[in-house]
Amino acid sequence: MKRIGSSGGADLPTGHLSLPQPCIPLPGYPLLVRPVPAGFPSPATDYYEERLSLDEHLIEHAEATFFVRVKGQSMTDFGIHDGDLLVVDRALEPTDRSVVVAVVDGQFTIKQLCKLQTGILLRAGNRGHSDILVSGDQELAVWGVVRWSVHRV
């Protein structure tokens, strides 16, 4: 072993240098503390940035959360568009009017779950698409509850 440096550092094998540790990046992304008005502009003074973790903001049950890519236009009235990325939580119990990923007779669909006295209605969010009234001879499973829709502006 050969001592590297003159500050009394540890013995290191010849040819190895003791380099400073790299900076550890902060988790998350910058977030302005003050909301930005979508109407009348406000002064941009006195703002302070925090860090925002999208994982912490969007995901409540990490082990039961999945991302699903949307195909089709049947839910546009709910703000869900073709190509959107949905955050789906399988740990949540669906309630009346929840937007869900459902499996009807082995086929996936995204619809609003409506509990009726006569059964379950899976409501489309676009007048050009049909609702699904689940009959007694159909198989229905709610795969998960949609929590967020992410799309490009």
Image: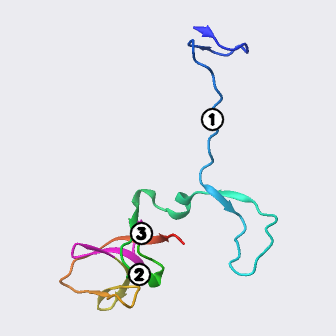
Count of number-bearing discs: 3
Residue drawn at x 41%, y 67% as measured from the top left: 88
Q: CA distance from mark 2 to mark 3?
A: 21 Å
The earlier-in-sequence mark between 2 and 3 is 2
Q: Earlier in the sequence, mark 3 or mark 1?
A: 1
Q: Quadrant of the N terminus?
A: top right
Contact between labelled residues 2 and 1, with CB atoms less than 8 Å apart: no
For label 1, the SS is loop
Badge 1 crowding class, 10 Å Cα cut-off, few under 14, some 14 to 19, many 20 or more, is few
Q: What amino acid does circle 3 point to?
A: Leu
Amino acid type, callout 1: Pro
Q: Residue at x 40, y 87 (%)?
A: 126
Which is more N-terminal, label 2 or label 1? 1
Give the percent coordinates (x, y) of residue 105. 21, 76
The Cα atoms of the two marked residues, 3 and 1, are separated by: 40 Å
Q: Residue at label 3?
A: 92
| Amino acid type, label 2 | Met
Q: Residue 22: which disc?
A: 1
Magenta-colored span: 83-109
Q: Pointer 2: what residue?
A: 75
Secondary element at tag 3: loop
Q: Which element type, helix, strand or loop, lies under badge 2? A: loop
C-alpha gap between disc 1 and disc 2: 46 Å
- Considering every residue shown, the one lying at the far left of the view is 137
Place residue 110 in its image quadrant.
bottom left
Quadrant for the C terminus, please: bottom right
